Image (cartoon, helix red, strand yellow):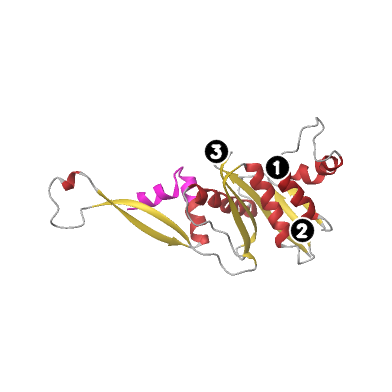
Amino acid sequence: MTITAAADGSALGNPGPAGWAWYIDDDRWAAGGWKHGTNNMGELKAVLELFRSTAHLGEDLLVLCDSQYVINSVTKWMPGWKKKGWRKGDGKPVMNLDLLQELDEAIAGRQYRFEWVKGHVGHVLNEAADVRARAAAEAYQRNLEVPAGPGFGGASSSPIRVTVPRETAPATAAASLFDLDEPVLREVTLSLSDEEYSRLLIRARAEGRSPEELLRGLI
């Protein structure tokens, strides 16, 4: 049996708030990230965590990946880097060394192959991984709870909390006329499931807005 999964990374600003995700189906996926990282870090971490999460199964793994950097690192460059003491042909140290060394350990003894897929063209698994990686990056950017996912067949992750400021009338009828000149900002906290937040992100990105801007526009 072969497990087919997509792995993807995202960085807002590159470098900036960064996320990673791997995705098999709605019951088996995971995501995470950092306050500051690069897209390549996210891509490598997604593949690393995919191998770690499936290590106990003993199944072949087909990794769908839109990063040529990751695919070439694992399938072409890593053996040469190791022989040179994890240095490139020009003698310079390899970037993202810690992630590459951890990935080298994780793939040892595994049966796997990589397949390149073009990103952002509607590939179902790739898009699902991309949405979750970006959601993690945006959660770090906005200091929200990161949608970590159920992992490999675990329980559903905690809801994401989105705080949406909106303008309302003054809270009391006793407010003066001068108070009406400056709107009072109220905080509305909305709890969304991972699936709901993913749909929100897809729609917001399609309209070129942030999730908060999209929700505020519905008021």
The residue drawn where x is 20% and y is 53% is 170
Q: Amino acid at mark 1?
A: Asn
Residues under labels 2 and 3: Cα distance?
31 Å
* Disc on the earlier residue, 3 or 1: 3
Determine the image quadrant of residue 128. bottom right
Task: Identify the main secondary structure in magenta.
Answer: helix
Please state the extent of the stretch shown in magenta in the rendering: 202-219
Residue 208 lies in the magenta-colored region:
yes
Q: Which residue is mark 3?
A: 13
Residue 68 lies in the magenta-colored region:
no
The dot on residue 33 is none
Tell me where residue 43 appears, x and y as whole percent: 67, 47
For the residue pair 203 and 99, the one nearer the viewer reads as 99
Q: Which is closer to the viewer, label 1 or label 2?
A: 1
Q: Amino acid at mark 3?
A: Gly
- Left or right, 32 with reference to 69: left
* Disc on the earlier residue, 2 or 3: 3
Residues under labels 3 and 1: Cα distance?
18 Å
Tell me where residue 129 appears, x and y as whole percent: 62, 53
Label 2 secondary element: strand
The dot on residue 96 is 1
Q: Which is closer to the viewer, label 2 or label 3?
A: 3
Position of residue 13 relative to residue 147, above or below, is above
Q: Which residue is mark 2?
A: 61
Mark 3 closeness class: few <14, some 14–19, many ≥20 residues within 10 Å: few
Determine the image quadrant of residue 32. bottom right
Tell me where residue 134 appears, x and y as whole percent: 55, 49
* Disc on the earlier residue, 1 or 2: 2
Residues under labels 1 and 2: Cα distance?
23 Å
The residue drawn where x is 71% and y is 39% is 95
